[in-house]
Amino acid sequence: MEKKRPTLFSQMVRAGKRTYFVDIEPTQGHQRMVLLIESQGPGHERHRVLIFEEDFPRVLDVLLAARRYLEENPFPLSQS
């Protein structure tokens, strides 16, 4: 039976029909990883992205660049 890894950090964001979780857990190799989890729909379907600690600074730089782009380039929402 697989042991459950302890969660070192966890925060949740509710966004309409979706819920996002940001967790930090240790790896078996004694490092840490960031888990981005999206939960949605009536069956709470989940999607997970694992980012290892060594890659996190580069991924964060790209996410911050994407945030700046969104702030500087507003896009009108289409009326459907």
Image (spheres, grey):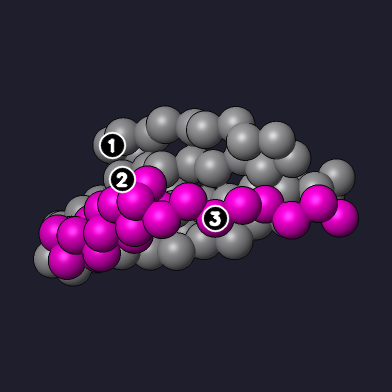
Q: CA distance from mark 1 to mark 3?
A: 37 Å
Q: Which residue is mark 2?
A: 24
Q: Residue 41 in the image: state x and y as whole percent.
A: 80, 48
Q: Residues within 10 Å of mark 3 (few under 14, many from 20)?
A: few
Q: Which stretch is magenta?
A: 57-80
Residue identifier under label 3: 75
Choose top left, top right, bottom left or bottom right for residue 16: top right
Residue 40 location in percent, x, y?
72, 48
Left or right, residue 54 beside residue 16: left
Mark 2 to mark 3: distance in Å?
33 Å
Cβ–Cβ below 8 Å for labels 1 and 3? no
For disc 1, the neighbor class at 10 Å (few under 14, some 14 to 19, many from 20) is few
Would residue 36 be visible to someone looking at this image? yes
Q: Are marks 2 and 1 in contact (CB under 8 Å)?
A: yes
Dot 1: element:
loop
- Left or right, 19 with reference to 64: right
Please, is residue 68 above or below residue 49 in the view? Answer: above
Residue 29 forms part of the magenta stretch? no
User: Which comes sooner in the sequence, label 1 or label 3?
Assistant: 1
Task: Name the amino acid, label 1.
Answer: Leu
Seen at 42% across and 31% down, the residue is 11
Is residue 76 left or right of 48 when viewed as pictured?
A: right
Q: Is residue 59 magenta?
A: yes
Residue at which label 1 appears: 8
Q: Give amino acid for label 3.
A: Phe
